[in-house]
Image (spheres, grey):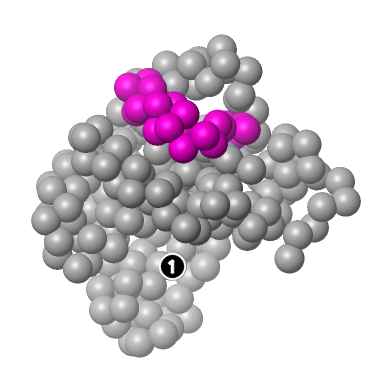
């Protein structure tokens, strides 16, 4: 199965993408994870990506498309893939379609997670990250045992630049502006399925499975 996941920042795309990819035995390709990995290692790509991300802007197409092309060519995608964080614009969607035509792997479904803006703001501004080991916490869903201290290594927890309320709202606005045409694009192609993303993690997973037409009798393991 070849899938794309759409949804605003903080919609829980990453969590759902990991779960669904695991259930169906397909590769989870997260452009955000790839960027963060490169930022951590201080690569050229990481430095470029960080400049944009710190300003709450999207990383330019040519950078992202190169990464996705490389990922899709990997052995891990032979059983299928789930793209999370790409495409974000119609131009990227066109580039993706060309890539997939080249390798003979068309998309099966595009899942759009719908989450109200206020829910996104509440979710994202409550995220905290360990300065030392990079572990993530959430003040509401997954708080540390001791306020401000990482359970795993005792490091200091901080709020990432892109989790501050003004940055979150800027990202949401940018997301809506650029992604609405993309939602229309996939709807016109008959690939789009809409899933409410503001329930519990399990509820959303079940809703996605049902939207994919495999909600019944498929547990995967």
Quadrant where the N terminus sits is top right
Question: Measured along the vertical axis of the image, is residue 95 above or below residue 5?
Answer: above
Q: Residue at x 27, y 42 (%)?
A: 66
Count of numbered circles on the image: 1
**Picture quarter with the C terminus:** bottom right
User: What is the quadrant of residue 201 in the picture?
Assistant: bottom right
Relative to 221, 163 lies left or right: left
Reading the image, the residue beneath label 1 is: 137
Q: Position of residue 144 (x, y in %)?
A: 45, 76
Q: Residues within 10 Å of mark 1 (few under 14, many from 20)?
A: many
Where residue 211 appears, as percent x and y from the top left, is 72, 35
* Residue name at image x 28 percent, y 67 percent: 158
**The residue stretch that appears in magenta:** 89-114
Question: Is the residue 173 above or below the residue 51 in the image?
Answer: above
Judging depth in this view, the residue of 11 and 24 nearest the camera is 24
- Which residue is situated farthest in the top direction here? 188
């Amino acid at each position: 199965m070849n899938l794309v996941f759409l949804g605003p920042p903080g919609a829980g795309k990453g969590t759902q993408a990991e779960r669904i990819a695991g259930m169906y035995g397909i590769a989870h390709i997260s452009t955000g994870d790839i960027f963060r990995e490169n930022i951590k290692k201080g690569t050229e790509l990481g430095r470029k990506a960080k400049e944009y991300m710190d300003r709450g802007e999207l990383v330019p197409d040519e950078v992202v498309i190169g990464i996705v092309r490389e990922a899709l060519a990997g052995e891990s995608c032979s059983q299928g893939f789930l793209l999370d964080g790409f495409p974000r614009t119609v131009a990227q969607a066109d580039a993706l379609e060309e890539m997939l035509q080249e390798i003979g792997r068309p998309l099966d479904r595009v899942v759009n997670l719908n989450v109200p803006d206020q829910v996104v703001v509440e979710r994202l501004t409550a995220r905290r990250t360990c300065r030392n080991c990079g572990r993530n916490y959430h003040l509401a869903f997954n708080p540390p045992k001791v306020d401000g201290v990482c359970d795993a290594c005792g490091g200091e927890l901080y709020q990432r630049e892109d989790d501050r309320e003004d940055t979150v709202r800027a990202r949401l606005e940018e997301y809506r502006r650029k992604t609405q045409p993309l939602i229309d694009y996939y709807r016109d192609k008959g690939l789009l399925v809409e899933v409410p993303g503001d329930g519990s993690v399990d509820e959303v997973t079940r809703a996605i499975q049902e939207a994919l037409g495999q909600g019944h009798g498929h547990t995967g393991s």
